[in-house]
Image (spheres, rainbow, N blue to C red):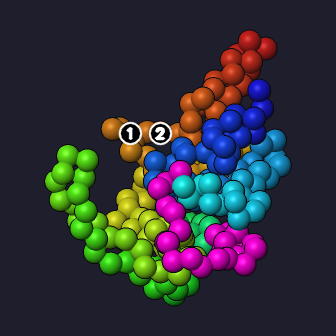
Amino acid sequence: MQISAILHGESQSGAPMLGDHLAMDLLNTEARDDGKAIEFWNNDAEVLQWLARYGIAPATEGKTLDPGELLNRAKALRTLARQLITEFKEEKPSDISELNQYLHSFHTVPHLAKDPEGKLTLSRISRSTSIGSLLGPVAEAVAELLVEGNFDLVKQCEHPDCILWFYDRTKAHKRRWCSMALCGNRHKAAQFRKRSSS
């Protein structure tokens, strides 16, 4: 089975949830298989499906988006996130002003509610425009990674045909693959074939 078939089988929206961090999964909405690019976001609906998997839904204010607006802004955020994360990993100076534009459009307010057991909970809910409410939490995850993340644990899969990222939360911090089911097994099979042909 090709990796693209496995990746597309991950969910209805196709993009893998292997990054162990929302910012990593944002980058993983693009993948590669046999040198060919795989784009998991081809329209607004696919972006909305991906956001819904993380519990992000539009603020209920009745605003509508122009067709393609969410897709274009989401892809721009992904490109920006990839640039910033790569620069931080390489300890290069970064211009964070564009990320701040996403963050500044994400307005939240405190919200008191009862949980299923009747206990009070305090959370924050979005009062942003539709784009701000949708992409704000993703931009915030990128910002939190830049501020709090250990960039020794921000890694890219070691398989030469894979571009997926992950945050290595393993105990020994020795994770090498986006997933053992994907690239780990491909590597093992290649090593086995190499040994068998010797």
Q: Which quarter shows the C terminus?
A: top right
Expressed as whole percent of the image width and height from the top left, the position of residue 158 reads 61, 43
Q: Where residue 112 is drawn, which disc sits there? A: none
- Residue 5 as seen in the image, left or right of residue 11: right
Q: Earlier in the sequence, mark 2 or mark 1?
A: 1
The reply to whether dot 2 and dot 1 touch (C-beta < 8 Å) is: yes
Crowding near the residue tagged with mark 2, few <14, some 14–19, many ≥20 C-alpha atoms within 10 Å? some
Expressed as whole percent of the image width and height from the top left, the position of residue 44 reads 71, 65
Q: Distance between the residues labelled 2 and 1?
A: 7 Å
What residue do we see at 28% from left, 71% from top?
111
Give the secondary structure at mark 1.
loop
Residue at mark 1: 170
Three-letter residue code for mark 1? Thr
What residue do we see at 68% from left, 36% from top?
9
Can see residue 25? yes
Q: Is residue 61 magenta?
A: yes
Expressed as whole percent of the image width and height from the top left, the position of residue 97 reads 51, 87
Residue nearest the viewer, comparing 27 with 58 = 58
Residue nearest the viewer, comparing 32 with 109 = 109
Looking at the rendering, the stretch of residues picked out in magenta corresponds to 53-76
Residue at mark 2: 175
Q: For residue 70, which quarter of the picture?
A: bottom right
Three-letter residue code for mark 2? Arg
What residue do we see at 50% from left, 66% from top?
138
Q: Which quarter shows the N terminus?
A: top right
